[in-house]
Amino acid sequence: MSEEERPRAPNHSGPGYLLVVDDSEESARALRYAAGRAKSINGSMTLLHVIAPPEFLQWGGVQEMIAEEAQEEAESVLARAADEVIALSGIRPSLLIRKGKLTDEVTEALAADPGLSALVLGAAAKGAPGTLVQYFSGERAGALPAVIIIVPGALDIAAIDRLTGNVAADDVPDYNRGQDDAQG
């Protein structure tokens, strides 16, 4: 791998994107958008996976085993997402695993890192947009320390790549073609 192809370490000189990662299609679209934007503007990315608090079980050994499995799953989800970010952007993201209520942990992660300038969320293509989109775009939106970017679920990969500038020059339509002839 050449030096240019090596993943860049997290860069806190550019805008930072926080992305909540799970195995959903919405998360995958948001990841693609955030990776493309971060690459285009030399930004950074932080991937967050939140482990929901376990329900109380009377047997401690079983509860401990469930917690270990949740931790392993979180690490696996983040590792796959980090590989995807590196493949798309060459940026090595910061990884966070937090335990607690999803919305509280996202809010605390944003507040804890002043380098994060945007929360990137994916909305469902149909029906309700999703828990995080509803929560953060509602009455709480005005109190967040970062902007919210919502990636619509109906956008396909090509549209996301066009929006982020993550396309080859040959793939971008020339909207000015023919205007010189029409004006002349």
Image (cartoon, grey):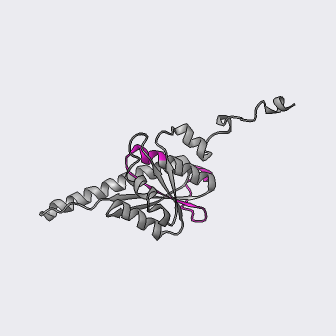
Identify the residue at the far front of this view: 139
Q: On the picture, is 74 further left or further right than 109?
A: left
- The front one of 138 and 74 is 138
Whether 58 is among the magenta residues is no
Q: On the picture, is 159 further left or further right than 108?
A: right
Residue at image coords 38%, 45%? 128
In x, y percent, where is residue 100?
A: 31, 64
Q: Quadrant of residue 49?
A: bottom left
Against 33, is 68 above or below?
A: below
In x, y percent, where is residue 177?
A: 76, 32
Identify the residue at the far right of this view: 184
Residue at image coords 18%, 63%? 56
- The front one of 153 and 167 is 153
In x, y percent, where is residue 84?
A: 47, 47
Which segment did they paint magenta? Answer: 1-29
Q: Quadrant of residue 63?
A: bottom left
Q: On the picture, is 2 further left or further right than 103?
A: right
In x, y percent, where is residue 73?
A: 31, 53
Whether 22 is among the magenta residues is yes
Residue at image coords 43%, 48%? 27
Position of the C terminus, as image quadrant, is top right
Against 92, is 125 above or below?
A: above
Residue at image coords 82%, 33%? 180
